[in-house]
Image (cartoon, grey):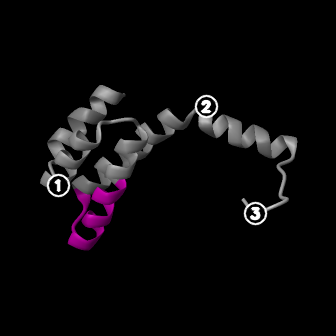
Amino acid sequence: MAKHQWLNPHQKGIVRRYYEHRDSLMVQKLGEIVSELYTCESEAKAAGLWKAARTALLNLGVHEGRADGIVDDRDLGRLARLLEELF
């Protein structure tokens, strides 16, 4: 945020609710990524989705080594099982 910009009460409420529900939003986002990876035909798009999956996993508090292992192996089955654990 730029200097001297303040949030009004309505905006503060929006930001507060986002952070209250951040975990459920990240799980939903990861589920969407898994679905897209199952149907993805383009290698370039898949690379971007795997990068987004890694970010979502880290935001959910998954250990970096575990997230990197799944993403580096591009193991969609392990990613889906981890999603089940998180959900």
Q: Are marks 1 and 2 in contact (CB under 8 Å)?
A: no
Which residue lies at the image location 63% right of the left edge and 39% below the top edge? 18
Q: Residue at x 67, y 35 (%)?
A: 17
Q: Contact (CB < 8 A) between labels 3 and 1?
A: no
Between the residue at mark 1 and the residue at mark 2, the CA separation in whole angstroms equals 31 Å
In the drawing, does residue 78 fall left or right of residue 19?
Answer: left
Q: Amino acid at mark 3?
A: Ala
Q: CA distance from mark 3 to mark 1?
A: 37 Å
Q: Which residue is mark 3?
A: 2
Inspect the magenta stretch and tell me whether residue 50 lies in it. Answer: yes
Residue at the spot 78% in from the left edge and 41% down from the top edge: 12
Where does the magenta region start and end? 39-52
For label 2, the SS is helix
Could you say which is closer to the camera, residue 43 or residue 74? 74
Residues at circles 2 and 3 in contact by the CB criterion of under 8 Å: no
Residue 49 placement: quadrant: bottom left
Q: Is residue 64 magenta?
A: no
Q: Residues within 10 Å of mark 3 (few under 14, many from 20)?
A: few
Which type of secondary structure does the marked residue at label 1 adopt? Answer: helix
Q: Which element type, helix, strand or loop, lies under badge 3?
A: loop
Q: Which residue is mark 2?
A: 20
Of the residues under marks 2 and 3, which one precedes in the sequence? 3
Viewer-side residue, 66 vs 78: 66
Reading the image, the residue beneath label 1 is 72
Q: Where's the N terminus, which quadrant?
A: bottom right
Q: Amino acid at mark 2?
A: Glu
Query: x%, y% of residue 46?
Result: 25, 64
* Residue 42, visible in the rendered structure: no
Q: Amino acid at mark 1?
A: Asp
- Where's residue 87, x and y in %? 36, 28
Closer-to-camera residue (6/16): 6
Task: Determine crowd level at label 1: few under 14, some 14-19, many 20+ residues with C-alpha closer than 10 A.
Answer: few
